[in-house]
Image (tube, grey):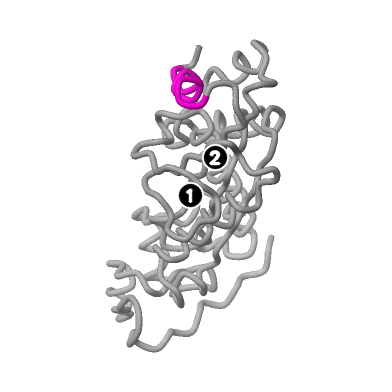
Amino acid sequence: MNPRFTYDLKLAGRALVAGADEAGRGSLAGPLVAAAVAFDYARFTDEGFAALEGLDDSKRHTRESRERLYGVVLAHATQIAVVSCAAPSIDARGLHVCNLFALERALAALRPAPEIALVDGFTINDSAVPHRGVVGGDGLSAVVAAASIVAKVTRDRFMIAMHERWPQYGFNGHVGYAAPEHRDAIVEHGVCELHRLSFQSVAYRQLGLGLATGEGREPTPQPASALPAE
């Protein structure tokens, strides 16, 4: 059996267990996406455990294997909730605040509430759902790994779709992260509506956009014009 299932079963037994994780925290463009996934282990069969044998932290998978696992998670999860925070919200409220908000809202959307909830990395203050933070949880727990897959695939699909509107940035490849080609595109084309302007990016500084986080940052530059979809 996948050791991440063993972790969950030793911790919670045959209970309704939820995991929460996010994707996009370190990107230059696009939303932060949090997902909560619940597995009812009382109803899990050997077939379910076998189908999800490859479940692991989304970062350890290729785009193709994440897509495959995404469908399997949807087929075996009791509940799934996804919450997204767009770039303007991240700029206005701060990345960490948005991260906690999205994780909390995703867990709170699960009905019925899980008997045990696990969050990757840390606990969330003021959460109505009792939970525990698990450092490296997406590599230890099956439900947290499932949440990481759902969050990552959901976000990647959105960014790939946005490539049709802004093909000059290559969102279909790096999906908004700080790849060299993305930084080069920002230098050449400026920023678009998807870019987070509260990050101290090298590319932004090269453009003369040394934006500071929080209050008192410099005025937002005009976004690059959207190119028509081909």
Residue 133 image point, x, y percent:
39, 43
- Distance of label 1 from label 2 (alpha carbons): 10 Å
Question: Which of the numbered marks, if any, corresponds to residue 23?
Answer: 1
Region rendered in magenta: 3-12
Mark 1 is on which residue type? Ala
Residue 96 lies, with reference to residue 119, above or below; the image says below
Does residue 115 belong to the magenta stretch?
A: no
Residue 176 image point, x, y percent:
47, 57
Relative depth, front residue between 222 and 107 = 107
The answer to whether the residue labelled 1 contacts the one labelled 2, judged by CB atoms less than 8 Å apart, is no
Q: Residue at x 54, y 51 (%)?
A: 34
The residue wearing badge 2 is: 147
Horizontally, is 190 left or right of 194 in the view?
left
Horizontally, is 166 left or right of 23 in the view?
right
| Pointer 2 local density, CA inside 10 Å: few below 14, some 14–19, many at least 20 | many
First-in-chain label (1 vs 2): 1
Mark 1 or 2: in front is: 2
Q: Residue at x 57, y 51 (%)?
A: 155
Q: Residue at x 46, y 50 (%)?
A: 174
Quarter of the figure with the C terminus: bottom right
Mark 2 is on which residue type? Ala
| Pointer 1 local density, CA inside 10 Å: few below 14, some 14–19, many at least 20 | many
